[in-house]
Image (spheres, grey):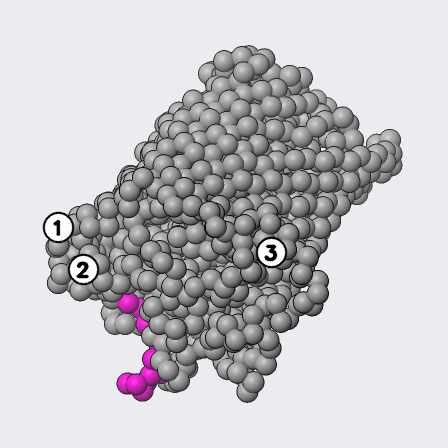
Amino acid sequence: MRKKQTIINYHRSLRWVVASIFAFGLTYLAAAENTSPSSKSPTLSSTDVPTAPTIASGEAELLPTPLPAKDVAIQADVSEENEPRQPEEKAKEKPLQKLLNKPLLVAPKQLLDELFETESPIQLDDEPSGETQIAQGTATDAEEPDKTADTVEANGDDDDEPPTVPGVTVEGHQPAFAPVLGSGTIFGNLEGAFDAGGSGAFLELGPLKSKAYDNPNRILNNVPGVYLREEDGFGNFPNISLRGADMGRSAKISLMEDGILVAPAPYSAPSAYFFPTVGRMSAVEVFKGSSQIQFGPHSTGGAINFLSTPIPDRKTIYTNFLFGTNNEMRMHTWLGNTMETPDGGRVGWLIEGYFRETDGFRKIDGVNYPIQNAQDTGFTKQEPMFKMFWEPGDVDTYQRFEVKTGYTSFQANDGYVGQTMADFNADPYARYSGTRFDNMQTYGARNYLRWIIGDQEVDWMTIAQTVYYNKFHRDWYKLNKLYDGDLASMGTSYGVSNVLGDPIGNAAGYGVLNGTQAGVLGVKHNNRDYYSWGYQGVMNLAMQGSKWDHDIQLGLRFNADRIRRFQRQDFYETNSVGGVSGFNAGTWGAAGDRRQTTNATAFWAMDRMSRGKWTLTPGIRVEKMDMRYQRFANENTPQDNTGSLTMTSGGFGLTYKKTENLSFLASINRGVSPPDPKKLTSGLSEEEVIASEFGWRYTNPDRAVVGQLLYFYSHFNDLIVLDNVGSGADPESNDQVGSLYANGLEFTLQYDRGIDKNLDFNNPLFVSATYTDAALLTDTLSHNAESIFAGGQAGALVPYIPEFTLTLGAGWHFDKSGFDITGTYADATYTTASNETFVDGVSTDARYGTTSAYFIWDMSAYYMFNENWKIFGGAQNIFNEKYVVTRHPYGPRTGPPAFVYVGVEALY
């Protein structure tokens, strides 16, 4: 056994040595080509400090300048010889109308003139009057921080500059082109988030690299109104709720990457235990309130869009290595370039690799049974990606073609099983011997081809069209049942959560679980294949009327997705010391043989109407779905059912800019979430929420302070409980819970004392807090005894929604070094709507009870060796808090323990 483990560790180390040599070899080659003093290569800036997390809500929620960012910002000067093509100049000479068939535009033009009181379609000025663009924090004098320099830049000060949008820089390098709304990004940047008709957030992830936040829970804690439930402690399976929605597997959120639905089958199976890898992303957009109108199919819980690494505007190589406790290793490396073509166009490309591996922080007792590699409860993740774009030079109107392909391979030695409370209190990081076969194997591919016509900085109309195809496979092999007999006579069957809830009354099952009694382990192959493909088109129109200016977005999407479930359950006979004495393989299909498909068509329209200090944003979305549910004979009596559903959602947002510093926001919207094909064909309708919000935001650039206070109210009807054990629901249950409400306050405040007091260092301070009151309005309609909503009565608190959450932090950043500290607090919550308190040995189900309140502190620091190299390190959960973070899927589980790390970052 030890020899086998040694070989495994040897191959693991060898893989990392090879990867390190490859990455540093690329860095060395880049350095060799950039040794000339005149070379304008990107560098790690030693004069930028990390911004405090910036939350956008409405028109101007935060400082016009994110607090200067010294942490990671990698700068790339633009020399004349390397300056990219300027598509807006060609577009001015030959506007979009010349590309299209003029006769076809006559009638629409006249209609638009009448509807919106416009003259002929206008071209947006390069320098809008009285408007500024929010720039990514750039270098400030270490001796005397400047309150105004390189914080607010006029939009289009230099006609010779290419159209770029500050605020989307990733690790400081400039992307090759500005994002086009609807072509991968929705807000576009911080300014776009400020201008949205409802509340939202735009978070750049580059400044968080030194904090080693690859866990989405750590990042989204900075956004008020977001509730998070850990499951594995690493963020691989996050459960996310926005403003009170059911958080099970994040299924009530429209999850996107570069503007494309990324959930493996968002209509047919939204709860697929999949989440994008945050460690390779450049930014994240969070949509709440009426800012989420255009998203679907799930809008009761909001929307989240991750932005992948953009293609750089010149030859650039980036490398980030991290080493931490529990043998954790991470590597994020990419290289890219943008070149001019002979016809005056441009071609750009990016190759990226992300790797993460850890032994995990939970340990299986390897003494009581012979098992190889028993101590490894971690995971390995590998994600390569390739991007390319082409901008033709000899065209009448600016165009861009993009292609992206990526692959994910993920292997984790984890399952569903938690602990009894007695065992948790003794050692929260222990795992039972019966879970030693738990393993998840997944792989997936994501692809899209995009065509963009028109430059949003110049043309009155832009069109972005995308075709996409995603495929995902997972086989989660995990403990499902316990038996106190043998393979010949299985004996009594025990549910894992019942054993953990009452280990005394279920002593035989508990003995089989911990390896002290002979019995049988039922381990199921949760084997599934997911597919999604479709077309998405987004048209943006900018028109100026005699009274109102209009920014209109029209969208159309055709999506088809499918899940194929083909499962079996195996049986391991174990002896009284946990050793395996027999094995029977199950029959494929007997534990699940189903197919669910959905074909959906969606249309949405939004109009951002501006006049003076007022901005109104109405919007509507209509979606029609045709669904089919099939169950085959291997599992049970065959079924083949079909059904259709049409959903309408929409809303209205309003902002009023009272002064240059003070703005007010209000919105109301209807969100929906459809049932999956099985539930739809069983008679269920869509889940609905009526959500409203209002509040204010204050910004004062001179004092480097910004604040926001919002009140929200959400009323949910016909809440759908997911059909998975992670939510406690029986797979055969088709209940809708009933009605509930969630209301509360969201507060954020940012202040940089270094800028305000004119100190020789930056001192950013921030706080983000949420108060929530969420409860059932009716007695629960769920008849499934294991549902987290079972037994709930009117007035009962909603499970896993804390009353109060808080994130706060401070930083001290000097010329070449910096230091940050961040704290996160969350109240204890009930884990079921019955609002029961768990009593060990008496409760019948370990999922009933409460989580723990916790206050976690993180620290990080960095030092710049030179303009290209930086070392960083830190610790997360520095006081090693032990707390119950969840009781689902099977019993209490702890959050991650103290994690210490050190890393190096380089860019050439």
Instruction: Kindly identify the residue that appears in the image at 77 percent across and 39 percent down.
Output: 627
Under circle 3, the secondary element is strand
Instruction: Kindly identify the residue that appears in the image at 62 percent across and 71 percent down.
Output: 98
Q: Is residue 606 in view? A: yes
The span shown in magenta is 34-45
The C terminus appears in which quarter of the rendering? bottom left
- Compared with 16, 287 (above or below) is above
- Residue 146 tag number: 2
Q: Is residue 380 in view? A: no
N-term-proximal mark, 1 vs 3 = 3
Instruction: Kindly identify the residue that appears in the image at 61 percent across and 67 percent down.
Output: 97
- Residue 757 tag number: 1
Under circle 2, the secondary element is loop
Q: Give whichever of 761, 161 is nearer the camera.
A: 161
42 is within the stretch colored magenta: yes
Q: Residues within 10 Å of mark 1 (few under 14, many from 20)?
A: some
Residue 509 rendering spot, x and y as whole percentages: 61, 25
Instruction: Kindly identify the residue that appears in the image at 19 percent across and 56 percent down.
Output: 147
Cα–Cα span, label 3 and label 2:
40 Å
- Residue 539 tag number: 3
N-term-proximal mark, 3 vs 2 = 2
N-term-proximal mark, 1 vs 2 = 2
Cα–Cα span, label 1 and label 3:
46 Å
Q: Give whichever of 115, 752 is nearer the camera.
A: 115
Residue 598 rendering spot, x and y as whole percentages: 75, 43
Compared across the picture, whether 596 is left or right of 31 comes to: right
